[in-house]
Image: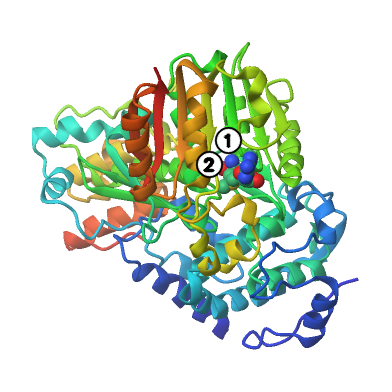
Amino acid sequence: MNFRGHCYGLVLRSFRYLPFPLPLWSQSMARALLRWASFTSLETSSRLPFIQLPRTLNPRATSLAFSSSSAAAASSNYIHLSDEQLMAQCDMDTFKSSGPGGQHRNKRESAVRLSHRPTGIVAQAVEERSQHKNRAMALTRLRILLALKVRKAIDLDGYTPPSELLQILPAKSTIRGKDVGPQIGPNNPKFALGMQALLDLIFAVEGSVSETAKMLGLSTGALSRLILSDDSLRVTVNELRTSKGMRPLR
Amino acid sequence: MTLRFPFPVRSPLRPDLASSLHRRLSIPSRSSSSPTPLLSSDHRPPLFLRPPAFAASRTDLHDFRRWAESLALAAGPRLSASDGGPDAALLRRELAWLVEDATVAAASESGVGEELRLRVELEELYRLWRARIEERRPFQYIVGCEHWRDLVLVVKEGVLIPRPETEMVVDLVAEVEGFEKGLWADLGTGSGAIAVGIGRMLQEGGRVFATDLSPVALEVARLNVERYELKDKIELRRGSWFEPLRDVEGKLMGLLSNPPYIPSSHIPGLQAEVGQHEPKLALDGGEDGMDHLLHLCEGSASALKSGGFFAFETNGDEQSEFIVDLMSMKLGNFFHNIKMISDFAGIQRFVTGFRR
Ligand SMILES: C[S@@+](CC[C@H](N)C(=O)[O-])C[C@H]1O[C@@H](n2cnc3c(N)ncnc32)[C@H](O)[C@@H]1O
């Protein structure tokens, strides 16, 4: 139906031409969009730009995100920081800085943008109803982005997966002990920690799903399903695979 | 009864609805200077607190959304270009929030199958959204609340809708040593936003006096104080600025105010949601916008106890600089550690300092 396609185009367009670095979509934002089920079918919404690197990554950030230097390794623990510690590394602003604001305006300045100084990663939130909540949402998104974008070099010889990675693996993994507890899914805030460790491993083996699966005691199919269970994880893995000339997972 | 609006998306106007709207609501004209007259709906609780006494089919709600969305997409560019009003993206978010407030969230309660439970009649939803777009009635008055920090505050015509910038006043107070046990005043409390934000953090012995000249503001503030069960922490008093605080003169640990600070000459050019719907008493700060701020600065010396803290919101850089100058030079004998604090848009929004 026409209206549907029309609206989808608008969603995309209205975000593509925003006058600041692109919003970094997280699953929850995607989910919020999906609640507009009347306008976006699952199929189209999965093509929305969930996650993108900010257009203006500073040079240091690029090396942090993609090098395997020890400096990068040291700084890859951002998402282990408390909210306060992480906030302290961020500049926060609102998007609409034109005009006098305050009493002059009806609700325009509650959107929040966090710029993480060490990496240049930007996370923002507009859809919550207060500035306070937008800030909390932006911080959640920043954690997901840090997990997706900041890579830590790992030593494949004698690699043992950290517990946060074990927690996101399905129970059938042969290396997952009983004491690990129930599997943590993408809706759990702790998922980002496991996702970061999983991506570290996948990057270390240059995108090979079968090799990663072997190291995690899973079948290739089971690992693929885990990767596909989260949109941002899938997109990140597929970007890597495409860049290495491999077929994207689907 | 189910209502259907099977009109095409591109012609969102429906004459019969529009005329019934005109009958039911009094529409402020562009030139009218007073806030919107109190509507009958004003005596009803905010949307999200009403019982889900109505029903509609999912298809009906879907149709409403499509209609409302098309209205928003068509009007947004015009409204934002004319006076800095809401753009289409903001209107769409508001629409999502309207539906959120009008429906029942819990799946168990929201009705089974095709039926949805609503807190207003579907027909009323159409009217409300039309008032939003065509009369520029602020979204917050339509739903009867504003989300501010982690609070949901009741608001209605006659009281200022608390602004996101002002959320920071609460953080400024939280940094003051020993604030939890002190006596505080929120002058010109409006909906009670600042007072409730502070009141919730206070401990034994801590108290907020929240004052306003407007009876409507005090009535709304009372609702919010009661909703957050802060009656024993917040005392509402009616009167002009320091007048109702004579008995605590010199005993206050802190003075907080977001007084009207818009220069009178700016009032006619304000975006319609503000200029035509919010109370002038809450906005107009006199010729240069500083009438009330200056009064507050002068009164602070005798109101605060030694070591007491103040935080005032201003119109921005110019007013803030003026006040810093006043407090640290002319009134420098009384105050110290005067600072400007910027909001998240980078505007010097607050002036803070301490009584010597
Ligand atoms: C900008 S509003 C601020 C409301 C609320 N504190 C907030 O931040 O949302 C200013 C408030 O000052 C009140 N006000 C105006 N003149 C006043 C006066 N002379 N004495 C006390 N309050 C006054 C208005 O009624 C209004 O509620």
> What chain letter is assigned to the residue under label 2?
B
Residue B258: mark:
2
Please give left or right for residue A15 compared with residue A153 in the image: right
Left or right: where B291 falls relative to B218: left
Observer able to see residue A217? no
> Disc 1 designates what residue?
B194
Q: Earlier in the sequence, mark 2 or mark 1?
A: 1
Find the residue positioned furthest to the front. Answer: B330
Q: Amino acid at mark 2?
A: Asn
Of the pair B129 and B254, the residue shown nearer to us = B254
Color encoding of the figure: rainbow
Indicate yes or no: mark 2 CB to ligand 1 under 8 Å.
yes
Mark 1 is on which residue type? Ile
Indicate whether B158 appears above or below B321: below
Q: Label 2's element?
A: loop
Question: Where does the image place residue B131, in percent across and percent down from the top left?
Answer: 70, 71
Q: Look at 68% across and 21% down and name the residue there.
A: B233
User: Image check: B44 left or right of B313?
Assistant: right
- Check if mark 2's residue and mark 1's residue have beta carbons within 8 Å: yes
Question: Disc 1 beta carbon < 8 A from ligand 1?
Answer: yes
Q: Nearer the viewer, residue B185 or B171?
A: B185
Pick the front one: B339 or B95 = B339
Residue drawn at x 79%, y 59% as measured from the top left? B38
Q: Is B125 situated above or below B190?
A: below
Quarter of the picture containing the C terminus of chain B is top left
Where is residue A142? Give x, y as percent: 35, 44
Location of the N terminus of chain B (image quadrant)? bottom right
* SS at circle 1: helix
Residue B186 figure quarter? top right
Chain identity of mark 1? B
Residue at the top extreme, as displayed? B204
